[in-house]
């Protein structure tokens, strides 16, 4: 069944108050719910039956205003509890029985390493009790949890704890009350034997907030970084958005089994362990950065998501796009702006552009869906964030802040739409964002084709920009969108020329944001004394593709001179893409010396920003190269990229070695952009040298592997070894690493991922062996992601083996997981959906694999939607 935005109707009944009592046992849980319900004054028409959503519930009893209903006074249809005759205002009591210990879907209430926890977004609350499980029904919650006192000493829910006590039979209870009305998807409960790290935060208005991170005892030494990140995020949101925290306590809980990264439940955020726990010895720089941004993301949701929430799930990007935009601004402020931008754009262009060009393409505000869990996508999150970012660019920071203030003030306590967000931005700024709204409605990545010419006599530079938006499933003939296009013009020395729109305009900017609204625009820039080199779409000012016939000399020039750091990196990527493509399928072609020279300059220039250098030296990934190619031939792309990498490493062997030796390991681990860059350069140079079998580098790698004082260095060495031709050392290092770290599941996940993603260590046989490894666990999403996800997403030469074995393996895995955890099964299906993108030898096998998934019995709605949309003509 497909659900349409156009069919939205306000709820017939509202719930003002929810009173919950959980009796938690080993063989199940009894949930007593008492709802204060009233007819919605905005609902039209006569009285209608009360309908409550449910999923996998055993109904025990229903009372209406204190009187038990007989079975002919309600209908239990499993997914719906219907009470045909209800008054305008009433109290409904429902008792259900659930089995958290058997809940492998990890939606609703379930058990993870012995503790009870919940995940209710988007529609998990209905797996706990019957309820109008939609975000526009907002209620105040009171929650009493009862459990065995020794097994579950810690009992948590949203809000403030207002009562606690001891019960008979070794049991106890705690009661929580959340004063803020919230939708059911923000409900949370945790019960377990946990230790807490306590801290405090004083808000700008002087309120004292109790901060707590709850973890299993074995993780007690991994909470500092998350706590520091939380305090930085709280301060930042006050300073940059004027948002203060509102409850007296803020809690974070780490759980091992979690379908996603983390969840912003009111006052009680629940995190996947891998997104919150870290210490330098066992987690990498990447993990530290991920944790900082996710802790901030979930915290920022307290305003963008919780205080102001979504009217319906079509509006998901209202909270996710805005919150991702906010967390990227935060990360940029905490570290390197340019490097953060590069990382976000690389992901967007590799994965979101691919989604936008595939069978699951959908607008930032979708018009329909079958299973909402499938719409927690890169389009909703990352493209949604880019859309908010473009509003920021069009309005400027001050008007944007006025707009966000107005949005929060106007809609506090409401469930609203993306349109309400844009309206607040319009009202605060006086700008017309009418055409801009198309970014929310039209799917597909706009393509900009840029042409230029220079009139020497008149000193006028002319730029013509055309936009077109490709058709996507169900959408064709799209209207032109409103695109902010940031432009720079470089003179022969590499300096920015002032960009004037009229002759002798005073204070002309060096970066000018052109606003594209028509299918084609021609801009004329006067007073340009020589033919400039254009720097197009600076800072990636819009999520679009840009076509312009750059010469390799121009790209080299931009790489070293563009004042926009992002575009310096982008020029390097374009040059590398061009060189790799030239080699594809041409064994006799040599690597363009300009790419080698450019890399040499980067490797030897100690005065340059090393964080940017580290990024610029990375070759574009295979997935990105595939995204840029029609009828992609994976093996050819892989080999061309390998050849470029090997030529670079061979030609620059001495420079790489010198660069490696120059990077000192700081004695005290810090996560500053400088130290991160240094470790990243160390590991990259090592990897390149090992890739070409350099014996001296092998010694350095073994030494770094054994003596590293932090996981970035240790796993960097391991990764380099795992991808090297030194077979004996490679196997030994992998074994030693497991011996050293087997007690830490998070490190074991890294160990799995390093092997499964390695074209050298991770052929299909090896990956199948990992599934048999005692540390592998089919019930734990992180383990599945670190083996199967890493193989299908990163180990492209083996996954895309031309005999189709990689695809069949993935299909088997999806079929196996479909019953136990449909959300994870659906996520794993993504690599197969892109079958049309590949050359016939590949697409045939992918198509077959999809069909074998389609033919499984009792396919979940999650996987059904993806497979059927992918196979549709
Ligand atoms: N709201 C969470 C976040 O972005 C993600 C929840 C994902 N839930 C799901 N069913 N996919 O922080
Ligand atoms: Zn979010």
Image (cartoon, grey):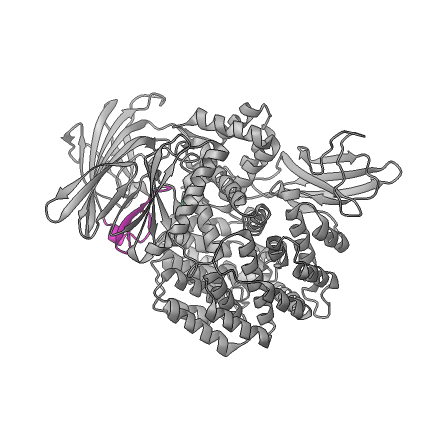
How many marks can you see? Answer: 0
Q: State the image quarter where residue 312 is shown.
A: top left
Q: Magenta span has 447?
A: no
**Residue 260 in view in this figure:** no
Quadrant placement of the N terminus: top left
Residue 664: x percent and y percent? 55, 63
For the view shown, which residue lies furthest in the left direction? 168
Indicate the position of residue 570 as horizontal and vertical percent values: 65, 51
Examine the structure image and report whether residue 104 is included in the region drawn in magenta: yes
Image side of residue 294 versus residue 605, left or right = left
Whole-percent x and y of residue 831? 50, 56
Q: Which of 846 and 285 is in front in this view?
A: 285
Tell me where the magenta segment starts and ends, as one range: 99-122
Q: Can you name the residue that lies furthest to the right here?
A: 457
Q: Which residue is drawn at 57% across and 29% down?
A: 398
| Side of 402 relative to 50 (left or right) | right
């Amino acid at each position: 069944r497909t659900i349409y935005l156009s069919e939205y109707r306000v709820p017939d009944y509202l719930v003002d108050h929810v009173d919950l009592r959980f009796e938690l046992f080993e063989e199940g849980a009894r949930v007593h719910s008492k709802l204060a319900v009233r007819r919605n004054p905005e609902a039209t028409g006569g009285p209608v039956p009360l309908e409550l959503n449910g999923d996998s519930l055993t109904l025990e009893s229903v009372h209406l205003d204190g009187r038990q209903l007989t079975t002919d006074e309600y209908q239990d249809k499993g997914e719906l509890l219907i009470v045909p005759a209800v008054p305008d205002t009433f109290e409904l009591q429902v008792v259900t029985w659930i089995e958290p210990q058997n809940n492998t879907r990890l939606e609703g209430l379930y058990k993870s390493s012995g503790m009870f926890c919940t995940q209710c977004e988007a529609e998990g609350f209905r797996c706990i009790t019957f309820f109008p499980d939609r975000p526009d029904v907002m209620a105040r919650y009171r929650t009493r949890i009862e459990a065995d006192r020794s097994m579950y000493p810690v009992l948590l829910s949203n809000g403030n704890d207002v009562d606690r006590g001891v019960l008979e039979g070794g049991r106890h209870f705690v009661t929580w009350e959340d004063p803020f009305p919230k939708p059911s998807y923000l409900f949370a409960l945790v019960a377990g034997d946990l230790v807490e790290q306590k801290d405090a935060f004083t808000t700008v208005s002087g309120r004292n907030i109790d901060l707590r991170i709850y973890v299993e005892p074995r993780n007690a030494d991994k909470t500092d970084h998350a706590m520091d990140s939380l305090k930085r995020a709280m301060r930042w949101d006050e300073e940059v958005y004027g948002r203060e925290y509102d409850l007296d306590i803020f809690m974070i809980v780490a759980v091992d089994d979690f379908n996603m990264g983390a969840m912003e439940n009111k006052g009680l955020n629940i995190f996947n362990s891998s997104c919150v726990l870290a210490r330098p010895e066992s987690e990498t720089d990447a993990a530290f950065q991920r944790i900082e941004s996710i802790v901030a993301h979930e915290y920022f949701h307290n305003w963008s998501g919780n205080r102001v929430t979504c009217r319906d799930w079509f509006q998901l990007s209202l909270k996710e796009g805005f919150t991702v935009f906010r967390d990227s601004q935060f990360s940029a402020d905490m570290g390197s702006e340019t490097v953060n931008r590069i990382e976000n754009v690389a992901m967007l262009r590799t994965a979101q552009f691919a989604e936008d060009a595939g069978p699951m393409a959908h607008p930032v505000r979708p018009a329909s869906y079958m299973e909402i869990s499938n719409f927690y996508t890169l389009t909703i999150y990352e493209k949604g964030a880019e859309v908010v970012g473009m509003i920021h660019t069009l309005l400027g920071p001050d008007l944007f802040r006025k707009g966000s203030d107005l949005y929060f003030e106007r809609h506090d306590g409401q469930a609203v739409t993306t349109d309400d967000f844009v309206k607040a931005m319009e009202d605060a700024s006086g700008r017309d964002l009418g055409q801009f709204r198309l970014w929310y409605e039209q799917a597909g990545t706009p393509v900009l084709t840029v042409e230029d010419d220079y009139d020497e006599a008149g000193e006028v530079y002319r730029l013509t920009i055309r936009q077109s938006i490709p058709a996507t499933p169900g959408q064709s003939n799209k209207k032109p969108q409103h695109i902010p296009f940031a432009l720079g013009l470089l003179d022969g020395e590499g300096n920015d020329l002032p960009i004037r729109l009229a002759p002798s305009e005073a204070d002309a900017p060096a970066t000018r944001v052109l606003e594209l609204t028509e299918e084609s625009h021609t801009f004329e820039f006067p007073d340009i004394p020589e033919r400039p080199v254009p720097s197009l779409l600076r800072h990636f000012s819009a999520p679009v593709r840009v076509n312009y016939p750059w010469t390799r000399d121009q790209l080299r020039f931009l790489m070293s001179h563009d004042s926009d750091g992002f575009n310096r990196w982008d020029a390097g990527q374009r040059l590398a893409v061009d060189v790799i493509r030239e080699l594809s399928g041409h064994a006799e072609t040599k690597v363009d010396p300009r790419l080698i020279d450019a890399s040499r300059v980067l490797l030897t220039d100690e005065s340059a920003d090393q964080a940017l250098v580290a990024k610029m030296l990375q070759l574009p990934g295979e997935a990105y190269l595939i995204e840029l190619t029609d009828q992609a031939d994976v093996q050819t792309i892989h080999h061309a990229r390998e050849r470029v990498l090997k030529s670079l490493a061979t030609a620059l062997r001495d420079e790489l070695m010198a660069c490696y030796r120059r990077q000192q390991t700081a004695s005290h681990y810090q996560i500053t952009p400088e130290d991160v860059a240094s470790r990243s350069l160390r590991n990259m140079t090592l990897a390149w040298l090992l890739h070409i079998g350099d014996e001296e580098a092998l010694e350095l790698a073994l030494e770094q592997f054994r003596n590293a004082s932090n996981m970035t260095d240790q796993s960097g060495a391991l990764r380099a070894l795992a991808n090297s031709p030194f077979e004996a050392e490679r196997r030994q290092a992998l074994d030693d690493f497991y011996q050293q770290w087997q007690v830490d599941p998070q490190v074991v996940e890294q160990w799995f991922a390093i092997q499964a993603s390695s074209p050298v260590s991770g052929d299909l046989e090896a990956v199948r062996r990992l599934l048999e490894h005692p540390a592998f666990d089919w019930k734990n999403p992180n383990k599945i992601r670190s083996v199967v996800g890493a193989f299908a997403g990163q180990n492209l030469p083996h996954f895309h083996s031309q005999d189709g074995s990689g695809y069949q393996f993935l299909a088997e895995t999806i079929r196996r997981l479909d019953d136990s955890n449909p959300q994870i099964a659906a996520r794993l299906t993504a690599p197969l959906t892109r079958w049309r993108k590949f050359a016939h030898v590949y697409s045939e096998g992918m198509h077959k694999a999809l069909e074998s998934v389609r033919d499984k019995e009792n396919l979940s709605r999650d996987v059904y939607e993806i497979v059927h949309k992918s196979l549709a003509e």
